[in-house]
Amino acid sequence: MNDAMHLIVGPGALGRLVALHLAGVAPVTVAGRRTLPAAQTLVTPEGVRRTVPLDMTTLAELPPLAPAYLHLTTKAYDAHAAYESTMARLAGDPILVLWQNGYQVQPELQRRHPGPVLCASTTEGAWLTGDEGVTHAGRGITYLGDLSGHHVERCRELAATLNRAGLTAEAVTDIETRLWHKLAINAAINPLVARYRIRNGQLRDRPFRPMVERVVDEVAAIMAKVGVSPPPAGWHTLVWQVIEGTANNRASMLQDVLAGRPTERDAILGPLLAAAQRHGLDTPCLEALYGYLARGSVTLR
Ligand SMILES: NC(=O)C1=CN([C@@H]2O[C@H](COP(=O)(O)OP(=O)(O)OC[C@H]3O[C@@H](n4cnc5c(N)ncnc54)[C@H](OP(=O)(O)O)[C@@H]3O)[C@@H](O)[C@H]2O)C=CC1
Ligand SMILES: CC(C)(CO)C(=O)C(=O)O
């Protein structure tokens, strides 16, 4: 057991998945905004159920801890509020680990946080089974890096801890590119499947296939202006590979829309639309999808 303490704020699907793994190798406290049962059940991708006691608390009851790591596992739109309420209670400046999708919270909190900030880009898949547990739907890989390029060793240390805990992780020196690549995938898939309430694989069919192509054209043009290098196979191939590999998924944004929750539209489409505006690019599809997610209606040209 490593004695570096991990505080995980945001006890949702990803937060509990990470907590239930880390608890086997390090001291872990999980903090949310409401009380959750201390015994949490993990259902593994193989269907095995494991119930693990966790130190669960609420931010309001959080003692003045000095954790080595503060993992922020809220949705992107809750990250700033969660960061502020947590930091107001902690002693010291922990290593902040950001697990959000998109590319909005990461540069903003990198500027705000006085300690090291690491970014995690993960392809793990998890969903909640209620207040008592989480299902690990699919194993993936977590890339860890930092935008400043000053904390490579800390990324390696955390990757080693996550690997010991049973989650595959790797420290990388190009996390910004990886976050933009994941954002491109999310931008091409999530708003369309949320808009049309379809599984990812249905994007391969008419009338959705040409819509995906147009969205990817817009994303690719923005990436070229921003200076994000394309994946080796190109943007279109990358997106179609993910659609193929996740054909049966109900993407996270579709689940949010169906449950009447806010979506991560600002974290995913926001950076693309802002870059398009800066560079004078016409992005009718992305704008229409953003408009739908903001207002609930869309007309794709
Ligand atoms: N789930 C997955 O498989 C993956 C998720 N991600 C990314 O990880 C992030 C988290 O996703 P996910 O776990 O699915 O989301 P969830 O909605 O399941 O979990 C978010 C959690 O954050 C809590 N929360 C919100 N605000 C605060 C706050 N101010 N203080 C403390 N806790 C708070 C919520 O509490 P409450 O219950 O009260 O709402 C909830 O428990 C997202 O950016 C997502 O895109 C990335 C890859 C995979
Ligand atoms: C890759 C994809 C689209 C898989 O569903 C995803 O990350 C999500 O659902 O948010």
Image (cartoon, rainbow, N blue to C red):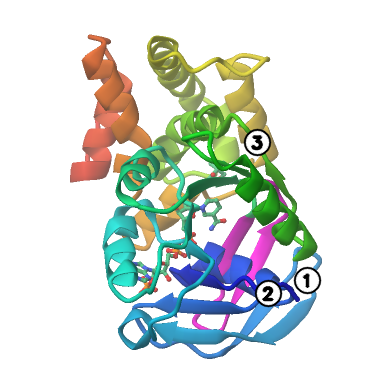
Q: Which residue is mark 1?
A: 47
Residue range in magenta is: 125-142
Up-down relation of residue 234 to residue 186 (above or below):
above
Count of numbered labels shown in the rendering: 3
Give residue 126's quadrant in the image. bottom right
Helix, strand or loop for disc 3: loop
- Tell me the amino acid under the disc marked 2: Ala
Q: CA distance from mark 1 to mark 3?
A: 31 Å
Asked if residue 214 is positioned above or below residue 206 in the image, the reply reads above
Residue 292 appears left or right of 245: left
The picture quadrant where one finds residue 237 is top right
Residue type beneath disc 3: Val
The residue that label 2 is drawn on is 26
Q: Position of residue 180 (x, y in %)?
A: 48, 29
Distance (Cα) linking label 3 and label 2? 23 Å
Residue 83 on image: x %, y %: 33, 62
Q: Residue at x 79, y 63 (%)?
A: 164
Residue at image mark 3: 172
Is 176 displayed left or right of 54 in the figure? Answer: left
Asked whether 139 falls inside the magenta stretch, the response is yes
What amino acid is labelled 1 in the image? Gly
- Is 15 situated above or below 147? below
SS label for mark 1: loop
Q: Is residue 248 visible?
A: no
Q: Nearer the viewer, mark 2 or mark 1?
A: 2
User: Decide: marks 2, 1 in contact (CB < 8 A)?
Assistant: no
